[in-house]
Amino acid sequence: MIPAGLVNDLSPLPALQPSSWQDQLKSAFRTPRALGEYLELPEATIRAAECVGQGLPVFVTRTFADRMRRGDPADPLLLQVWPVASLSHQNAASDSFCDDPVDDVSAQAAPGLLHKYHGRVLLVLSGACGIHCQYCFRQNYAYSDLPSGIVRWQESLQYVESDPSITEVILSGGDPLMWTDGQLERLIESLEQIPHLKRLRIHSRMPIVCPSRVGERLTHMLSNSRMRVFLVVHSNHAREIDSSVAAAFGQLQAARVVLLNQAVLLRQVNDSVADQAELCERLVDCGVLPYYLHQLDRVRGAERFEVFEDDGLRIIEALQKILPGYAVPRYVRETAGAASKLPVVESSTGK
Ligand SMILES: *Cc1c(COP(=O)(O)O)cnc(C)c1O
Ligand code: SF4
């Protein structure tokens, strides 16, 4: 045993308070230069990113950046957030990339509420996220039209209340965990008063990019809900899930939250059998079931991330041969006007 005095001698610094999730976001990298220099990327790589005028600005937490390989411009975590100039118009495929490929606009039934599928409505709570993903399908969404503040959500709550076929509310965004615990508490309390609601689902990348978001107040709130709570985390690569993320998963599981993952199939990020197998195994070893692998939505600016459906199908077939059935996600894509997300199948392959 080490005598207490010796421990004190070895640790002259006062114990640091663990920083809050808001502090983590405040200190996030917001420019290619700040992130690039931190990661010791080549100067030419940083300069090229600084010249990119379109797309989402860089936003990456330090904890997520710490999982990237230093000096490697091809790191799969970095590629998701690093600005690259879009393809030129000479590329025919880019003609079918548009602002609203999934037709969210016509599914809007009340301000910030999308009712596309039977029994489920989706609330677009926030336009903000704990990371900016360059492939994001909501990057052109008119978030400024969102109701702001809990009072303005009354119209959406009334919509849910008036339709007893709705049994599940999905909190989405942006990232719904950008709302404070206090705001979420008030919303969830209102939802709980609607008797036909049985399930609450939260789609969030915060447990991955800012695991300190999963605090006691949040887990307490979720474990005390009368609704069954599902949290769909969005992880695209096994290396995103370090021990701090696994610990956040553990806290949520202790709060009886069912954890699922959805990933997006992304070129050069996770488009190999090895990448997907590693991600799925890492997830199930953390008690998180792979739910969906999404074909990229064809949103303008995301062209460079597209993987052909034939290649995606080959990856899924290979996964089925090496993983237990529960570890293989459903490979789906969103089709405007369809009654659900549709499985990607051989005959539907369109390049
Ligand atoms: C994806 C989505 C859902 C949920 O679909 P599931 O197949 O249940 O995961 C619900 N509403 C909207 C608008 C969606 O885009
Ligand atoms: S976390 Fe999700 S909504 Fe936010 S930028 Fe990334 S992909 Fe888009």
Image: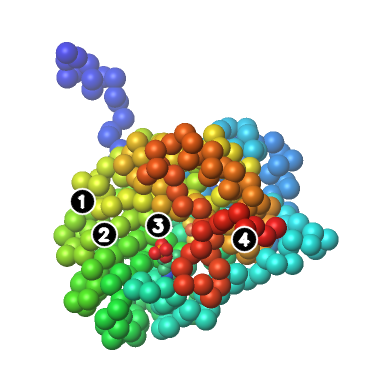
Name the front one of labels 1 and 4.
Answer: 4
Read off the residue under disc 4.
Answer: 348
Real-space Cα separation, disc 3 to disc 2, in angstroms = 13 Å
Read off the residue under disc 1.
Answer: 255
Secondary structure beneath dot 3 equals strand
Secondary structure beneath dot 1 equals loop
Read off the residue under disc 3.
Answer: 204
* Earlier-in-chain disc, 3 versus 4: 3
Real-space Cα separation, disc 3 to disc 4, in angstroms = 30 Å
Q: Residue at x 21, y 65 (%)?
A: 227
Real-space Cα separation, disc 1 to disc 3, in angstroms = 17 Å
Read off the residue under disc 2.
Answer: 229
Mark 3 C-beta to ligand 2 under 8 Å: yes
Q: Residue at x 25, y 47 (%)?
A: 253
Q: Residue furthest right?
A: 90
Determine whether 302 is above or below 337 in the image: above
Determine whether 46 is above or below 172 in the image: above
Determine whether 301 is above or below 146 in the image: above
* Earlier-in-chain disc, 1 versus 2: 2
* Earlier-in-chain disc, 1 versus 3: 3
Name the front one of labels 1 and 2.
Answer: 2
Which part of the image, by quadrant, shows the N terminus?
top left
Seen from the viewer's position, the closer of residues 15 and 25 is 25
